[in-house]
């Protein structure tokens, strides 16, 4: 397959290894990965905060970038449940808010080929064992958008449990929010901190070496709290685990989300 990678703003700026890992993984599975340099933002920060009119130019830019390529690519992949959820649900809401039927049709066309990473692997590529090797104990945090908007369900866990050498342990109160929520963490910082404090404590109580999720933003928030409190677990993106092999093992160093390198 020919797959277009939309890296997302946060991954591009804060977690570039997540994008590199996504490329390594998909290429190892025999697929061609292309990257459109015109890509910018999906508009999630605007739509989450209710700024639909301000989001409209961003949504149009996204559609202008990806719609023309749909004849030459089989899928668009985003290593982010929240950004994929924005494309699949919130872009439609923005178009309706603008009373723009043409834009609504265009966003529906693009959304139909847009997938979060675990969806692409399990539903489109029909694979759960990707040949990964990760000899560590991990616990999985299902991020809010991936769980409640995309409804990815057990897909990430199916992929994780097929990894050689891994041990997956349960995360207490796994379905609770980490407290990030984009601008929520800025506008409601005290509440956000209380939420991530609880989440970090649950990660520690799981006994895992790593907490894994499909959103770099949530991992940055959780990893930051773990790091500031001196807790041992580290945060890692699903793509980074799935890209690791015996020949090319995962090396933490500066690739750990939420920790100073």
Image (cartoon, rainbow, N blue to C red):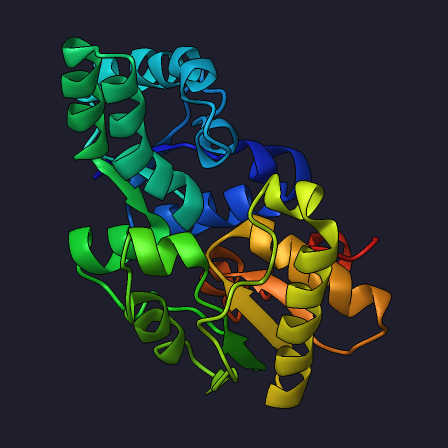
Residue 252 percent coordinates (x, y): 71, 62
Displayed quadrant of residue 1:
top left
Identity of the residue drawn at 29% across and 12% down: 98
Q: Is residue 82 above or below residue 201?
A: above
Residue 209 percent coordinates (x, y): 65, 80
Displayed quadrant of residue 192:
bottom right
| Residue 37 appears anywhere in the view | no
Q: Is residue 186 above or below residue 251?
A: above
Identity of the residue drawn at 37% across and 46% down: 27
Residue 234 percent coordinates (x, y): 69, 69
Q: Which of 216 and 190 is in front in this view?
A: 190
Residue 125 percent coordinates (x, y): 20, 53
| Residue 203 appears anywhere in the view | yes
How many marks the image carries: the answer is 0
Q: Which of 181 and 83 is in front in this view?
A: 181
Identity of the residue drawn at 62% across and 79% down: 203
Identity of the residue drawn at 46% across and 60% down: 143
In the picture provided, is 150 more to the left or to the right than 104?
right
In the picture provided, is 229 more to the left or to the right than 36?
right
Displayed quadrant of residue 235:
bottom right
């Amino acid at each position: 397959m020919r797959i277009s990678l939309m890296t997302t703003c946060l991954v591009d700026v804060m977690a570039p290894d997540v994008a590199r890992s996504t490329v390594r993984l998909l290429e190892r599975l025999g697929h061609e990965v292309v990257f459109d340099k015109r890509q910018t933002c999906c508009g999630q920060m605007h739509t989450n905060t209710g700024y639909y009119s301000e989001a409209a130019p961003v949504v149009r830019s996204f559609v202008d970038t990806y719609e023309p390529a749909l004849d030459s690519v089989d899928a668009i992949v985003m290593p982010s449940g929240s950004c994929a959820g924005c494309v699949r649900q919130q872009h439609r809401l923005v178009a309706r808010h603008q009373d723009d039927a043409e834009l609504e049709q265009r966003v529906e066309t693009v959304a139909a080929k847009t997938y979060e990473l675990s969806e692409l692997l399990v539903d489109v590529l029909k694979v759960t064992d990707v040949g990964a090797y990760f000899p560590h104990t991990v616990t999985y945090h299902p991020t809010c958008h991936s769980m409640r908007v995309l409804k990815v369900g057990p897909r990430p866990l199916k992929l994780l449990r097929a990894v050689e050498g891994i041990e997956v342990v349960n995360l207490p109160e796994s379905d609770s929010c980490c407290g990030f929520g984009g601008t929520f963490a800025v506008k409601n910082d005290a509440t956000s901190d209380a939420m991530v404090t609880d989440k970090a404590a649950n990660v520690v109580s799981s006994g895992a070496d790593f907490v894994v999720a499909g959103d770099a933003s949530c991992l940055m928030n959780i990893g930051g709290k773990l790091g500031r409190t001196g807790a041992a677990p580290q945060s890692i993106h699903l793509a980074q685990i799935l890209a690791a092999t015996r020949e090319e093992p995962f090396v933490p160093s500066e690739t750990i989300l939420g920790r100073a390198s």
